[in-house]
Amino acid sequence: MKLGVIGLGTVGEGVLKILAAEGSRLEAMFGEKIEVVRVCDIEEKSFSFGEYNFTDNYRKILEDGEIDTVVELIGGVGVALEVAREVLGSGRNLVSANKHLLALHGKELFELAEKNRVKFYFEAAVGGGIPVLTPLAEGLFPNRFERIRGVLNGTCNYMLSKMEEGMTYGEALRDAQERGYAEADPTFDVAGIDTGHKISVLSYLAWGELVDFSSISITGIDKLTVEDVARARSEGKRYKLLGEAFKEGEDLVVRVAPQLVDTDELLYSVGGVYNAVEVEGSYTGKTIFYGEGAGMDATASAVVSDIYKVIAG
Ligand SMILES: NC(=O)C1=CN([C@@H]2O[C@H](COP(=O)(O)OP(=O)(O)OC[C@H]3O[C@@H](n4cnc5c(N)ncnc54)[C@H](OP(=O)(O)O)[C@@H]3O)[C@@H](O)[C@H]2O)C=CC1
Ligand SMILES: N[C@@H](CC=O)C(=O)O
């Protein structure tokens, strides 16, 4: 595999680090070597674990005929959309962690991948390091899905936990940003938009329908105060920012809001950067996926697993 990586921030660095550390072992397992042909970011970055052929122009990766698989880790829907269209449209494989791109342009990109018979994987886009999209699509498909609900944003969950411990909203957000959990624009996290992107992607896999994003009712945690969080605790409850999707007759309802969760619910114990996704299926009942929902190592693990999924075919 000849790889190009665009975006060397939190997740991009993590991906190169895991490939450097685990490459030989994974090469033996999969029988194929991964060569990182070129990497790209706006500013040149150096890493203690390896040297890379760097460019600050993503078009150099798109135009490099040797590269067969591109990893997009820029985020957003500007350059990332151009990259996705061009990679899939030119018959190369794409791995991405970009839920914003999927929620807004997924339908076009899934069709493009299918038309050109290439692989397009995005496990890291929901739940960070938790394998949830692959199990949903490949392990639970015999079910008719009844409801999906979860704590889907690591930044908000981390902030709410820290606010319970007494940090202010601003201190908790800064802490989450320093740990690499937040989006480049953290409004996406705290206003619930990132959770909206993720529940859209989950709904698409469960019901084959990508909802019009503007139709989703979204409330974030940005109006919650330390006092609100303390009051909930004094009543034996916790605020959790939940993304939810379910069928109401023929309609697919998708919504995001902070909700008070009781001690007897599993989601009550999901603290810090952890995420949890509950999937209710007609045959399985409730299945729960739990793990680190953001951060360098956990997210990069999901991206690297997608890269090897491309190899596995
Ligand atoms: N961080 C996390 O825990 C998780 C992130 N994700 C997703 O992964 C993706 C990457 O996130 P993350 O690593 O945190 O983001 P970062 O902001 O840390 O990294 C993105 C990198 O891409 C660079 N970049 C931006 N535009 C371009 C461009 N045109 N050409 C080349 N490089 C560019 C940025 O440079 P500059 O900073 O100068 O703009 C930055 O270095 C996003 O889609 C995010 O939603 C998914 C799951 C978890
Ligand atoms: N900003 C996101 C990153 C992972 O998707 C989050 O905090 O969950």
Image: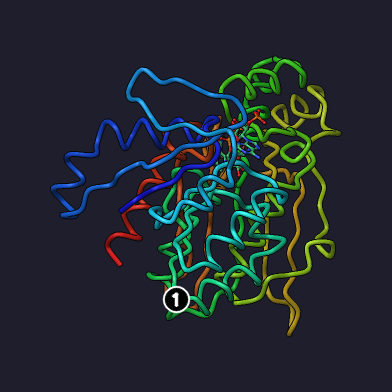
Q: Nearer the viewer, residue 146 or 298?
A: 298
The quarter of the picture where residue 83 lies is: bottom right
Label 1 residue near ligand 1, CB within 8 Å: no
Taking the image as shown, residue 169 lies to the left or right of residue 33, namely right
Q: Is residue 219 above or below residue 221?
A: below
Residue 11 horizontal/vertical position (percent): 50, 35
Ligand 2 quadrant in view: top right
Relative horizontal placement of residue 25, taking residue 115 as reference (left or right): left
Instruction: Identify the residue at image location x=60%, y=41%.
Output: 74
Locate residue 83 relative to residue 3 in the image: left or right.
right
- Closer to us: 241 or 265: 241
Which image quarter is the C terminus in?
bottom left
Q: Residue at x 60, y 77 (%)?
A: 208
- 21 displayed left or right of 199: left
Where residue 308 appears, x then y in whole percent? Answer: 31, 54
- Residue 232 position by quadrant: top right
**Residue 196 spot, x, y in % from top left:** 72, 54
Labels in figure, total: 1
Q: Is residue 297 above or below residue 129?
A: above
Q: Amino acid at mark 1?
A: Arg
* Residue to which mark 1 is pinned: 117
- For disc 1, the neighbor class at 10 Å (few under 14, some 14 to 19, many from 20) is some
Residue at x 68%, y 29% (from the top left corner): 160
Residue 205 position, x and y percent, is 55, 70
Dot 1: what SS?
loop
Q: How is the model colour-coded?
A: rainbow
Which residue does the image show at 64% across and 44% down from the upper left?
Answer: 75
